[in-house]
């Protein structure tokens, strides 16, 4: 194990935001189909965030335990400030992403799920079937997105204006967003 850490490494680790992307899909994790969810999330993040950040990606099969342990690794192990999951939010028996999320968060933030369902309802009546939720674990904000790659941008567009300030409030690393893409709101700023 290398315990040496130069001064600039410390400085960078304090400012470089860490974003976890967790794809939850039986078939994508088994290679039955190509994962398109992770790329859809990453493409959005590249457009919207203009400060420095790195991505830590994982893909797991559906299940409360698989989701919970991946979230713990991304939050406690990798120190992610923001963790976006995609998939497994519906009502079918294997859809257990909200259960896995509930197992690891300390506080729920119901407004995220409410807003994502509201905007998605303008697209599809089945938006109400998503049980997507959000919450915090220590200094990580965790947000569930539906699995359909086409759902990702509409959901992220809706919630992203509130994410930078939420990260400030929970003591996560600061992110700056591109104002042409997203009107982030920081009260008092
Ligand atoms: N990571 C992904 N990449 C590409 N398409 C996906 C992905 N996740 C979901 N989808 C598509 O969105 C649909 C709904 O997503 P959902 O999370 O309910 O998946 P599912 O039907 O339970 O199957 P699976 O878990 O095997 O992806 C899927 O049937 C698939 O067509
Ligand atoms: N914006 C948007 N939201 C959406 C959808 C969609 O196509 N677009 N699909 C819905 C459907 S059909 C389901 S079953 C739920 C849960 O999807 P998941 O299990 O892939 O997470 O998300 C819903 N939310």
Image: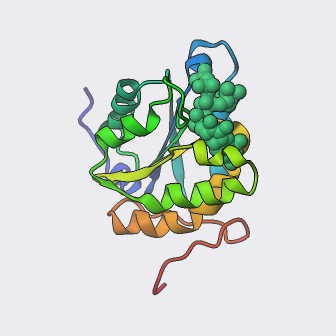
In the rendered view, tell whether residue 4 sits above or below residue 48: above
- Nearest the viewer among 55 and 148 is 148
Answer with left or right where residue 175 lies relative to residue 11: right
Colouring scheme, one of rainbow, by chain, secondary structure, one colour: rainbow
Q: Position of residue 123 (x, y in %)?
A: 76, 52
Quarter of the figure that contains the N terminus: top left
Q: Nearer the viewer, residue 78 or 140?
A: 140
Residue 136 placement (x, y as % from top left): 34, 53
Judge left or right: residue 146 versus residue 33.
left
- Residue 157, given in percent of the width and then of the height, sits at 66, 59
Residue plotted at (51% across, 46% down): 132
From this viewpoint, which residue is outermost toward the bottom?
188
Is residue 50 visible in the rendered image? The answer is: no
Q: Nearer the viewer, residue 186 or 148?
A: 148
User: Looking at the image, which residue is at 54% across and 76% down?
Assistant: 185
Where does residue 59 sit, x and y in percent of width and height?
52, 26
What residue is at 51 percent from the left and 54 percent from the top? 113
- Mark count: 0
Q: Quadrant of residue 64?
A: top left
Q: Quadrant of ligand 1?
A: top right
Confirm whether residue 172 shows in the render.
yes
Q: Is residue 23 above or below residue 27?
A: below
């Amino acid at each position: 194990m290398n315990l040496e850490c130069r001064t600039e490494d410390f400085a960078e680790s304090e400012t470089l935001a860490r974003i976890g992307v967790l794809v939850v899909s039986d078939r994508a994790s088994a290679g039955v189909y190509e994962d398109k969810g992770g790329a859809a999330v990453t493409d959005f993040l590249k457009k919207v965030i203009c400060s420095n950040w790195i991505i830590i990606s994982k893909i797991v099969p559906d299940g409360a335990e698989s989701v919970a342990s991946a979230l713990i690794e991304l939050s406690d192990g990798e120190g992610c400030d923001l963790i976006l999951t995609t998939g497994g939010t519906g009502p079918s028996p294997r859809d257990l992403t909200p259960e896995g999320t509930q197992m690891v968060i300390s506080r729920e933030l119901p407004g995220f799920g409410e807003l994502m369902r509201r905007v998605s309802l303008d697209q599809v009546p089945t938006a109400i079937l998503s049980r997507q939720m959000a919450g915090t674990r220590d200094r990580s904000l965790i947000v569930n997105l539906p699995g359909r790659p086409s759902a990702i941008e509409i959901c992220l567009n809706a919630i992203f204006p509130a994410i930078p300030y939420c990260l400030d409030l929970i003591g996560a690393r600061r992110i700056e967003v591109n104002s042409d893409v997203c009107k982030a709101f920081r009260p008092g700023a």
